[in-house]
Amino acid sequence: MGTDVITMITSDHRAIEALFERLNSRKGDPEADVAELAALLTAHARAEEDRVYAEVQPSEAHHGVEEHKEAEVLLDALKHATPGTPQFSETLVKLVESVKHHVEEEESEILPALRESLSQKQLEQLGKAFKERRESELLALRPPAPSKEELYKQAQEADIPGRSTMDKDELAEAVKKAKS
C-alpha cells in the first residue's frame, strides 16, 4: 500500500466494500465480518476526523463528520441485529447506502482537493499520521485472537472430530466452519 493519505483512505474504502460484499453474499461468519467491519469503519472514521479533516474546508469536514455519525448509528444497529433476520438485512442495506454515498463524495471532492492543495511530501506525512491513528484505534477495537486452549474448548463444545491433533490455525478454521 502507498504511504500517502489518499492511497490509504481509498484502500480502506475498498476493504470496507469487500466486507459489505461478503456480508451481502451471506458466506462466511457474519458476526466476525460485522466485528471486522465495525473495527475498520470506526478506526478509519476517527483517523480521518482527527488527522485529515483539519486539512479540508470546514464545511466539508463538518459534513464528513455528520456522515460518520450516521454510519456509526447504523453500524451499532447492525451489531445488535441477528444475522439472517429482516432487521439485519434492512440495516445492512441502509449502512451500505450511507457509506457508499460518503465514499463517493470523499473520492470525488475531498481527496482531489487534498491532492491539489498539498505536496506529495505533505500527503505522505498526513498518511503517516492517518495510519498511526488508525492503527491505534484498530488495536483498541479488535478483540485479541483466541488462544489455542480457547479454540480447543470451542472445538470441544462444537464436538469437532480430530481436534486433539489440530494446531491453532486448524482449530480456528474448524471452529469457524462449525459456526457458519
Image (tube, rainbow, N blue to C red):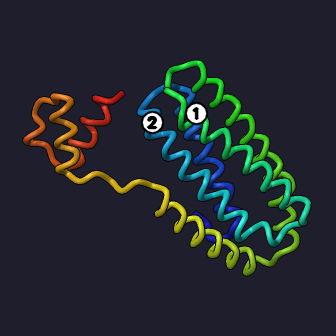
In this picture, is 145 found above or below 35? below
| Circle 1: residue type | Glu
Numbered circle sitting on residue 52: none
Nearer-the-camera pick, 144 or 135: 144
Closer to the chain start, of discs 2 and 1, is 1
Residue placed under numbered mark 2 in the picture: 31
- Vertical position of residue 86 compared to residue 92: above or below: above
Residue 73 placement: quadrant: top right
Closer to viewer: mark 2 or mark 1: 2
Q: Which amino acid does label 2 sit on?
A: Glu
x then y, percent, for residue 43: 59, 58
**Looking at this view, is 163 or 117 the one in front?**
163
Residue 45 lies, with reference to residue 133, above or below; the image says above
* Rendering coords of residue 169 (x, y %): 24, 47
Q: Residue at x 58, y 33 (%)?
A: 21
Q: Quadrant of the C terminus?
A: top left
Q: Could you say which quadrant of the image residue 144 lies in?
A: bottom left
Instruction: Name the residue tied to disc 1.
Output: 21
Q: Where is residue 7 in the image (x, y as percent from the top left)?
A: 67, 62
Q: In this view, does 180 lie to the left or right of 147?
A: right
Residue 56 placement (x, y as % from top left): 85, 67
Q: Is residue 32 left or right of residue 40?
A: left
Above/below status of 168 relative to 79? below
Q: Distance between the residues labelled 2 and 1?
A: 14 Å
Residue drawn at the location 59% of the way across and 18% of the way down? 86
Q: How crowded is mark 2: few (under 14 residues within 10 Å), some or many (20 or more)?
A: some
Q: Residue 126 appears in which quarter of the rendering?
A: bottom right
Q: In this view, does 147 lie to the left or right of 63?
A: left
For numbered disc 2, what is the local secondary structure? helix
